[in-house]
Amino acid sequence: MKDIVIKGKHVRRELIVFVICIVIVSVVNAFAISKYGTSWSELYSVWYAVLFVAVLLYVVLIPFRYIGCRLVRCIKNKRCKSKAVGQVKEQKD
């Protein structure tokens, strides 16, 4: 049975994306606290909600990141363009 090896580069990238999600949710939380005039202690007292919403944001971003990655690879390799051109030629014949 083969072992699955996850490179450190990928783990680091996912960790950075998750930290960015936490920062975004924390900034939105701070904005809401200032807008509605509640106590600033909520910034750290509701850490569990911030963490939950950050995980939710991370999960929601997965399909968008996958589509973006595929598009970038397609544009870099230009394989999609050549396949699309080949399909158009086959349809004309």
Image (cartoon, rainbow, N blue to C red):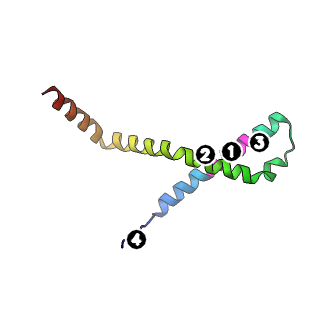
**Mark number displayed over residue 30:** 3
Q: Amino acid at mark 4?
A: Asp
If you read the primary sequence from the N terminus, does the residue marked by circle 1 or circle 3 appear first? 1
The residue wearing badge 4 is: 3
Q: Quadrant of the N terminus?
A: bottom left
Count residues near mark 3 (Cα–Cα under 10 Å), then give few for <14, some for 14-19, many for 20+: some
Mark 1 vs mark 2, foreground winner is 2
Q: CA distance from mark 2 to mark 4?
A: 30 Å
Q: Is residue 80 magenta?
A: no
If you read the primary sequence from the N terminus, does the residue marked by circle 1 or circle 2 appear first? 1
Q: Is residue 23 above or below residue 10?
A: above
Q: CA distance from mark 1 to mark 2?
A: 9 Å
Residue 81 drawn at (x, y percent): 28, 36
If you read the primary sequence from the N terminus, does the residue marked by circle 1 or circle 4 appear first? 4
Residue 91 drawn at (x, y percent): 18, 29
Question: Is 48 on the left-hand or right-hand side of 89?
Answer: right
Residue 48 drawn at (x, y percent): 73, 54
- Magenta-tinted stretch: 19-29
If you read the primary sequence from the N terminus, does the residue marked by circle 3 or circle 2 appear first? 3
Q: Is residue 6 above or below residue 81?
A: below
- Residue 20 in sight in this render: no
Question: Is 72 on the left-hand or right-hand side of 89?
Answer: right
Q: CA distance from mark 3 to mark 2?
A: 17 Å
If you read the primary sequence from the N terminus, does the residue marked by circle 2 or circle 4 appear first? 4
Q: Amino acid at mark 1?
A: Val
The residue wearing badge 2 is: 57
